Image (spheres, rainbow, N blue to C red):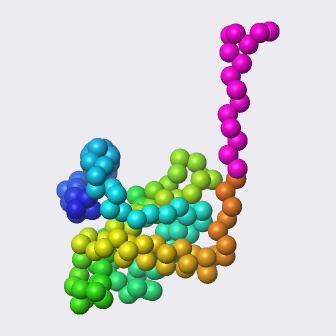
Amino acid sequence: MRHALFACLVRLAPRPSVAAAAGVALATAIAFCGGDAAAKSSFESTYGYERTWNAALRLVRVDLGLKVTEKDEQNGYLIFEYKSPDTGGKLTSGSIELVRSREASQPVQVMVQLAEQPRYHEQVILDTLARKMRQEYGDPPKLPARTPPAPDAGADSGS
């Protein structure tokens, strides 16, 4: 449902500034409606945004042979028509979202959501994407260790 709302907002917003404001409003609404967020399956990719985006797009279009109905690389979403063998080929909406970390050295959050499908369908897509990236790009890059912040000396540090 959120993806349909987002797609509607994007189509209705003729100017980038309006689209950005609509996106912020949608993100805020999603954050406060936390119950539905548990329906998504996700994992963290250390391959970087571009590699993860390219692999996800190729997975959906080429490997799975699904129709992409909307994509936006800059904002990190891909909407497609999903056909499950369990439902006799009935089409349902699916999406892959990529969320960049604030720090370039941190992993990309990858989320899959399939409307009207059991969660294991989402997990299968994520597992397939992770396996595809490992086969094409090698083992996942190791993240640099985070250094803890230096302790604050403060005014009462006894100098």
Residue 4, position in %: x, y? 22, 63
Picture residue at 49% right of the left edge, 79% below the top: 128
Residue 27, position in %: x, y? 32, 48
Above or below, comparing residue 57 to residue 152 in the picture: below
Picture residue at 70% right of the left edge, 50% below the top: 145
Picture residue at 26% right of the left edge, 70% below the top: 115
Residue 75, position in %: x, y? 40, 58
Pick the front one: 93 or 39:
39
Does the magenta segment cover residue 15?
Answer: no
The answer to whether residue 100 is left or right of residue 150 is left
Chain part drawn in magenta: 145-159
Identify the image quadrant of residue 136: bottom right
- Dominant secondary structure of the residues highlighted in magenta in the image: loop
Above or below, comparing residue 18 to residue 47 in the picture: above
The answer to whether residue 47 is left or right of residue 36 is right
Does the magenta segment cover residue 154?
Answer: yes
Pick the front one: 49 or 94:
94
Identify the image quadrant of residue 143: bottom right
